[in-house]
């Protein structure tokens, strides 16, 4: 290399002094390079690498042993706590927090293993002059990422503090709401026009609204909330919910409306459309009823809103609910007798109330018969199928004992001999079927011969 007078003047030295300094530096750099790339340094690096590898293996073995030791103890405590009949606060904490502790321990173990591998690679690469720069670069990159992470964490501390305050206020507000509606459901707190059975659904609805409001308030303070990826995912989820949840939203709104309409409660005996049974469950989306045939029918709440709902339990718990059946009797049977027979059949039926008393309505006077409607009260609508079966049996028995036909004269006009249509055991021994009557005098006057 060459040293000029300008270089010397810039350094404030003579050209000879500057040349000697540069030569010394070059000589020292060459000696260091030869020393670092000598076989002696390579063998020393191999020995150091072997020692560090041994330390890494020992460290990983200790990590594994500690993992097995703590995991076995925690699993043993979880099993003991889960199988105890009487659990203390400690056992309940272990039973519920044990799996979470195991999951956190697994995460920390992998973080420790990755950290050990990173340190091992950095130290090992630093033992060799050809890879020393790679080691420095990797170390600087790791520390820069940790520094960036720590800086991001510090920048997020104010937002995290705000989120913590929002969570704390929301939790106490939810507790207060739950406490208030708990007293309303028990009857300790009464509000005019607000029924106790509204307490639980109203509690859930208000708590859901509070959570949604808290999420809306806390959303801008979430880490990464302003990133394009986060916004894109939010828009995508919103589009999916708006396109795929129209029926669910309709059922949910119908469920809320049904709650405050008080058309029925859980345990009521109802008829929804063509389905009759006991309401066993009413959720925000569907209503489930148990039919007398032991069938559980799930009906969407939007369908319940559009159909007529008959509630038999509301009046059954007070004065009783009316059930009814119709029979058609010939005009020849006295209506007072028919009324008496129908009322006696109802009085002989199980689950029929004596007070209010059964009654009969004459629904119509048709061409060949009278339609009678028997009405009776019961406070057990769940037995409606058995009640109808027993009632129809009793009607048949009472009418047969009284010798009154139940079938209409349509059938009388077609049968041979016009024989009475009741079982033979109720027919008198001297009974003779009646025939058609002819007035012979009128027939002779009209020119009809016998």
Image (spheres, rainbow, N blue to C red):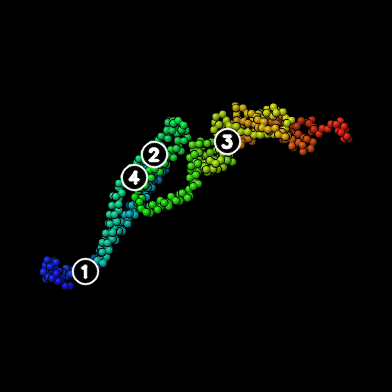
How far is mark 3 from mark 2, CA to CA?
Answer: 39 Å
Foreground: disc 4 or disc 3: 4
Residue 96 location (% of width, % of height): 39, 44
> Circle 2 sits in a helix, a strand or a loop, which is it?
helix
Give me the disc on residue 67: none
Nearer to us: label 1 or label 4: 4
Q: Residue 91 location, x and y as percent? A: 38, 42
Mark 3 element type: helix
Nearer to me, 204 or 41: 204
Residues at marks 1 and 4, CA–CA distance in whole angstroms: 57 Å
Marks 3 & 2, CB-CB < 8 Å contact = no
As measured in the structure, the alpha-carbon distance from the residue carrying label 4 to the one carrying label 3 is: 53 Å
Give the residue number, with chain letter if any, for mark 2. Answer: 174
Which quadrant would the C terminus be assigned to in this image? top right
**Percent position (x, y) of residue 250?**
50, 44
Counting other residues with Cα less than 10 Å from the Cα at mark 3, is it few (<14), some (14-19), or many (20 or more)? some
**Marks 1 and 4, the one that precedes in the sequence:** 1
- Mark 3 and mark 2 lie on one chain; the one further toward the N terminus is 2
Q: Which quarter of the figure has residue 277?
A: top right
| Residue on which the image places disc 1 | 33
Taking the spot 30% from the left edge, 46% from the top edge, the residue there is 158
User: Which of the pair 202/427 is nearer the observer?
Assistant: 202
Residue marked by disc 4 = 163
Q: Earlier in the sequence, mark 4 or mark 3?
A: 4
The N terminus - image quarter: bottom left
Foreground tag (3 vs 2): 2
**Circle 1/circle 4 CB separation < 8 Å:** no
Q: In this orientation, does residue 340 appear?
A: yes
Image marks 2 and 4: residues in contact by CB distance under 8 Å: no
Identity of the residue drawn at 72% across and 34% down = 367
């Amino acid at each position: 290399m060459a040293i000029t007078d300008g270089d010397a003047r810039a350094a404030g030295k003579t050209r000879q002094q500057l040349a000697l300094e540069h030569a010394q530096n070059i000589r020292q750099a060459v000696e260091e390079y030869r020393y670092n790339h000598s076989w002696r340094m390579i063998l020393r690096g191999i020995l150091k690498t072997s020692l560090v590898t041994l330390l890494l293996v020992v460290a990983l073995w200790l990590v594994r042993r500690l993992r097995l030791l703590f995991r076995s103890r925690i699993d043993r405590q979880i099993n003991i706590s889960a199988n105890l009949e009487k659990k203390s606060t400690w056992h309940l904490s272990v039973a519920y927090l044990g799996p979470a502790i195991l999951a956190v321990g697994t995460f920390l173990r992998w973080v420790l293993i990755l950290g050990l591998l990173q340190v091992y690679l950095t130290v090992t690469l630093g033992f060799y002059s050809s890879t020393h720069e790679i080691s420095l670069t990797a170390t600087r990159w790791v520390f820069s990422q940790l520094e960036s992470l720590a800086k991001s964490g510090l920048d997020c501390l104010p937002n995290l503090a705000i989120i913590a305050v929002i969570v704390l206020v929301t939790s106490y507000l939810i507790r207060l709401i739950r406490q208030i509606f708990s007293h309303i459901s028990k009857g300790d707190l009464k509000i005019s026009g607000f029924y106790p059975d509204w307490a639980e659904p109203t509690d859930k609805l208000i708590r859901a609204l509070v959570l949604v409001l808290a999420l809306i308030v806390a959303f801008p303070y979430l880490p990464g909330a302003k990133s394009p990826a986060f916004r894109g995912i939010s828009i995508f989820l919103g589009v999916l919910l708006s396109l795929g949840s129209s029926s669910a939203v309709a059922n949910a709104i119908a469920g809320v409306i049904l709650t405050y309409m008080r058309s029925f409660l859980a345990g009521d005996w109802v008829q929804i459309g063509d389905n009759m049974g006991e309401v066993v469950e009413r959720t925000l989306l569907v209503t489930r009823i148990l039919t007398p045939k032991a069938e559980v029918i799930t009906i969407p709440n939007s369908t319940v809103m559009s159909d007529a709902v008959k509630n038999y339990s509301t009046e059954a718990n007070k004065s009783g609910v009316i059930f009814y059946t119709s029979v058609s009797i010939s005009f020849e049977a006295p209506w007072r007798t028919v009324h008496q027979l129908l009322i006696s059949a109802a009085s002989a039926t199980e689950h029929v109330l004596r007070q209010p008393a059964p009654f009969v309505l004459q629904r119509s006077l048709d061409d060949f018969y009278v339609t009678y409607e028997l009405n009776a009260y019961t406070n057990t609508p769940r037995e409606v199928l058995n009640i109808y079966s027993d009632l129809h049996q009793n009607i048949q028995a009472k009418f047969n004992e009284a010798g009154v036909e139940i079938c209409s004269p349509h059938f009388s006009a077609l049968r041979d001999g016009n024989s009475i249509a009741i079982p033979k055991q109720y027919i008198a021994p001297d009974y003779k079927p009646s025939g058609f009557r002819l007035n012979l005098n009128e027939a002779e006057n009209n020119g009809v011969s016998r």
